[in-house]
Amino acid sequence: MTYDLERLRGARVLVAGAGVSGRATIAPLSHLGAHVTVTDRNADALARCAELGADTVELDRLLEDNSSLRDFAVVVTSPGFPPSAPLLSRAAGAALPIWGDIELSWRIDRAEIYGPARRWLVVTGTNGKTTTTTMLHAILEAAGIPSAACGNIGLPVLDVLRRSEPRADVLAVELSSFQLHWAPSVRPDAGVILNIAEDHLDWHGGIENYIEAKLRALTGTVGVLGLDDPIAGSLRDRSRAVFTVGFTLGYPDAGELGISGDVLVDRAFADSAVLASVDDVTPPGPAGLSDALAAAALARAIDVPESAVHDGLLRHRVGPHRAAPVGVVDQVHYIDDSKATNPHAARSSLLAHDRVVWIAGGLLKGARVDDLVVEVAPRLSAVVLLGRDAGEIADALTRHAPEVPVVLVDTRDDGAMTSELAGEARGQAGPRRVAVPGADAPTAMRVAVQEAAALARPGEAVLLAPAAASLDMFADYAQRGRSFVAAVEELRRGGTER
């Protein structure tokens, strides 16, 4: 079977997007005999693609000509392009095949272009994908299985496939809903949906389309569902996997993984196998345990022994900006969870603390925060907001937690500085604005941390869990997290570290 790759030989292929995933397609497409053209609005990124041997065309220039796509055989799109993007809408109207970079990766792997096909273990969900994927990779390494963590986690799948030394026989593939939408052919050995909450609804055009994209992880041999999540737990009847199991933080029924006392137990792939102790799991707490159970389920689906699950989870350490402790200043704990880019992720982080000053804001991407505010309001000592959609979060706090002090860090040029003291802000009914007109993102974060520090009492936590994406102010969530860490370090130098 050629997986429709023969059509690429001698044909022109258009790659939409000159970022990491787009660049990764150039060499494999050229290897298949295609003539590659990359389009983007970023001139520097296009120049990098030209250095790799691709033709390039600026996106707006390409769109000026209604007949510009007629000479292309396939469009390979980066995940950032939604179906409604003018380029892809035009390609669909011209009946051009549209493949995502993951779809191309799957076809190339199945065709054994770079050696025998790999085993794919796919991780998706609104939150916890990266932690689960790194846990899974740690388990595979503990089992002595040549493997790689790739996909949305940072390393393109195509780069892993092309690498002969060391060769990865099993891929722990983190996939976003964007990537899954453009990858209809993928049939993993095992795939998991961790959870589903409102996120990227602007990209998908609604929650049902978002769910449909996630369901593409459950089209292979084994499907795994997070049973404690209301939406994911309801999808068993919609799974297209040959065999579907679940995981829960409670005691597992037959066909499930879960927790019995203080140990993780597998009753899906064994009668009742003890996998690890609760204390072996990092990060601790419900979210970390759920991710560990999901990773264990994927590993057990390909017959990884219990001992390797235990050893892998014991060795695993959480990555940066994922509920990472930053330090303690004047008896206040500072936590960086910049990776909490939607309300569902922020919820897990907020519920881990009894009393917290919450730093939030950014791009909500169509998600609602009212339910989150209602649930966490009793834990909120104060809230500091910044970013484009800060006002929406402030409105929700006014509706559902009017007693919680709220500070809005306003970078607009028409903002008006107030002279109220942070201590006087406690108990106020509405938000207090702190104007820093025209400030860059790191400066705004520094002001937010200073405001939070003034509002926090000894024993409380100051938690960066934005519940929103970062691209309104920062290059990505990592830069946002680094700005928080730098602001805390500056605070520490002026305070007393305990």
Image (cartoon, helix red, strand yellow):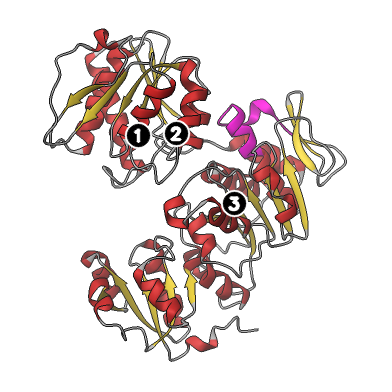
- Counting the numbered discs, the total is 3
- 1 or 2: tag closer to the N-terminus: 2
Q: Which residues are magenta?
A: 275-292
Helix, strand or loop status at disc 2: loop
- Gap between marks 1 and 2 measured at Cα: 8 Å
Are the residues flagged by discs 1 and 2 in contact, CB closer than 8 Å?
yes
Vertical placement of 11 versus 251: above or below?
below
At label 2, the amino acid type is Val
Q: Amino acid at mark 1?
A: Glu
Q: Label 1 vs label 3: CA separation?
A: 31 Å
Mark 1, Cα crowd under 10 Å, few <14 / some 14-19 / many 20+, is: some
Q: Position of residue 401 (x, y in %)?
A: 42, 19
Above/below status of 75 relative to 353 = below
- The residue under label 3 is 123
Marker disc for residue 286: none
For marks 1 and 3, the one nearer the N-term is 3
Query: Nearer the observer, disc 3 or disc 2?
Result: 2
Q: Quick check: marks 1 and 3 in contact, CB under 8 Å? A: no
